[in-house]
Image (tube, helix red, strand yellow):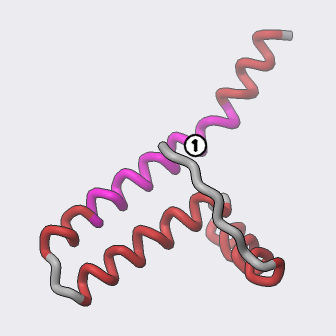
Amino acid sequence: MRATVVRFGPELFEEMQAEAAQCGVSVAQFVREAVVARMAYVAGRRDDDAYRLAARQAAIRVRAEWAESAQAPGRAGAVVRRVK
């Protein structure tokens, strides 16, 4: 996975943070899902079947990455307990 920096104004970030919390996901996951949704929307507008398939596959990957990241805090806690 690659990282990038995205800047938001304070008001937008607070709204986004609240929406992400309401959905039960991190802000990063919320942004990833928004990007996939936007890409699928744009592909649909231009009637791009090949991209629509790619967008579906990307959505599957995003959900898998989210599931993996959701497990990370538990794994980190297990490592800390083993080290102590």
The answer to which quarter of the image holds residue 45 is bottom left
Amino acid type at circle 1 is Ser
**Depth order, front residue of 63/32:** 32
Residue 12: x %, y % from top left: 74, 82
Q: Quadrant of the C terminus?
A: top right
Q: Residue furthest left?
A: 49
The answer to which quarter of the image holds residue 62 is bottom left
Query: Would you place residue 67 above or below residue 76 in this image?
Result: below
Query: Would you place residue 58 above or below residue 31 in this image?
Result: above
The residue tagged with tag 1: helix, strand or loop?
A: helix
The answer to which quarter of the image holds residue 75 is top right
Residue 73: x %, y % from top left: 69, 36
What's the magenta region?
55-74
Which residue is located at x 58 percent, y 43 percent?
Answer: 69
Residue 52: x %, y % from top left: 21, 71
Which residue is located at x 57 percent, y 59 percent?
Answer: 29
Residue 79: x %, y % from top left: 72, 18
Query: Would you place residue 65 above or below residue 35 in this image?
Result: above
Query: Would you place residue 84 above or below residue 44 in this image?
Result: above
Task: Determine which residue is flagged by label 1.
Answer: 69
Which residue is located at x 27 percent, y 64 percent?
Answer: 56
Callout 1 crowding tier (Cα within 10 Å): few <14, some 14–19, many ≥20? some
Which residue is located at x 21 percent, y 69 percent?
Answer: 51
SS majority, magenta: helix
